[in-house]
Amino acid sequence: MKIFASNAIREIDNATCEAQNIDSLDLMERAAGAVTYEIISRFLPNQRIVVVAGPGNNGGDALAVARQLFEQGYKKIEVFLFNVVGKLTHDCDEERKRLITLDGIDFTEVKRDFSPPYLGENDVLIDGLFGSGLRQPLQGGFAMLARLINESGAYVISIDMPSGLFGEWNDNISRRDMVHANLTLAFQTPRLSFFFEENADVIGEFKLLDIDLDDAKMKELHSDFMVVEARTVRPLLKPRRKFSGKRDYGSVLLMAGSIGMIGAAVLAARACMRSGAGLVTVHSAKSGMQIVQTAVPVAMFEPDKNDNYITDMTVHHTHQAVAVGPGIGVNPRTIDALESLLKTCKSPLVLDADALNCIAARPALLQILPPQTIITPHIGEFDRLFGEHSNSEERLKKAIDMAKYYNIIIVLKGHYTVTVRPTGRVYFNSTGNPGMSTAGSGDVLTGVIAAFVAQGYRPEHAATIGVYVHGLAGDLVTADLGEFGVMATDIADYCGKAIRAIVTREKL
């Protein structure tokens, strides 16, 4: 699913009206109908509902919702239309005219002074002040209104997007002066700003409402930002041939583990095998041999010369993927070994965890990363590599720049794990849940991505597929065990089920 900028949304709206031979007011009524249906599905007709509408088309949406709710038997509706400059858009004015013809509707058009209504925790407020057409942060009376709404305790439903929030970037804008929604009802596609952690309390839950926007126009318009869904991943997955053997699905060399952290190697190896790799060889501290061979007997073990940590990352055989990092520590000799590997390795690389911490300890190693290397940092590892960042928006911008500069693929882990390609294209993952916030989950992801690289997938596809499969495995585990009961071993063991669910179109 593409994530469109606000100006592109207007193009899509216009194309929809032209292709379907309707006018913009008809499309507004359709959008309002979708919002109304959602509200009816959640609240009874005796619910008190306060509607605040601005002078633009977002306000027109809100007025249309108020009218449709009233017509459906919701009589406790109070509407405030803010027309402080004396100018409404054409469609907003038309919706105003329709609304005021209704007998019994409680309607106030605010032109100067405003006496705010009482709002309490039992009330519902529909926010239609400003949508994606907003040009500047809320100021003056509108900022004060946003704060009043936020402090009221009312259940807030924002149409299109919370008033005051921009659709894309929100640098240095106070969230205090934005309406904080419990539920944001967006039309057809999400906005980029929905995926940043610092906006989570502003957006609340968001739901996409299908209003039959023009599919041809959405396919035509370019976007550098995408949401990865099952329908994105399914066409990329290659069917397994009947006449095939283990070597047809690639060999992974996994350099992982050190004394006290051999479990990281176990988790990555299990995930690698569960995700379809034909062969896995674990290179680890010599002391880890018995643990790995017992926990993952299907994996081969290549002992380092050192008992406690890895000192040699020489690749002795042909492997279709080399993954480095889980649990290796940051001993100077391990960093030396990693430097040697980066200079000599011919196989595609996946770097995670302590491999990234080793690079952070010796930043010059960034300059010798082989092209198309996949790195999978969490936010702490990312900031150690590329400098401190105050929020996820800043971090994504830096990831885009660094992926281009170093010609690498960055998998920035989080609630919406984001895969950034060297081309500047960005893929937000749609699977996963808070239950996956558990030790070893990242080690599992390393194994999953490495497995897809080994099976012959291009690194950028392997990263996108691997992140989706990893998150879906976590969702399947959570469905069985609950968010509090998930362990990384469970996620690894459910990877095969996740791939099957994608291929067979099981309900996801």
Image (tube, rainbow, N blue to C red):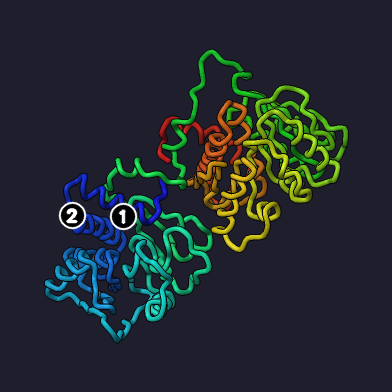
How far separated are the C-alphas under marks 1 and 2? Answer: 13 Å
Query: Residue at image x 87%, y 32%?
Result: 305
The tag on residue 1 is none
Decide if residue 485 is in sight here: no
For the C terminus, give its image quadrant: top left
Amino acid type at image mark 1: Arg
Quickly name the residue at label 1: 10
Relative to 342, say whether 484 is above or below: below
Tell me where residue 289 appears, x and y as whole percent.
Answer: 80, 32
Amino acid type at image mark 2: Asp
Quickly name the residue at label 2: 23
Q: Is residue 226 left or right of residue 305?
A: left
Query: Residue at image x 56%, y 34%?
Result: 462
Relative to 331, say whether 139 is above or below: below
Question: Which residue appears farthest toward the right when viewing the image?
Answer: 306
Question: Which residue appears farthest toward the top when viewing the image?
Answer: 243
Q: Is residue 469 left or right of residue 353?
A: left
Q: Secondary structure at mark 2?
A: loop
Q: Is residue 166 left or right of residue 10?
A: right
Relative to 117, say whether 97 is above or below: above
Question: Which residue appears farthest toward the front when viewing the image?
Answer: 405
Q: Secondary structure at mark 1?
A: helix
Closer to us: 378 or 123: 378
Tell me where residue 30 appears, x and y as whole percent.
Answer: 22, 55
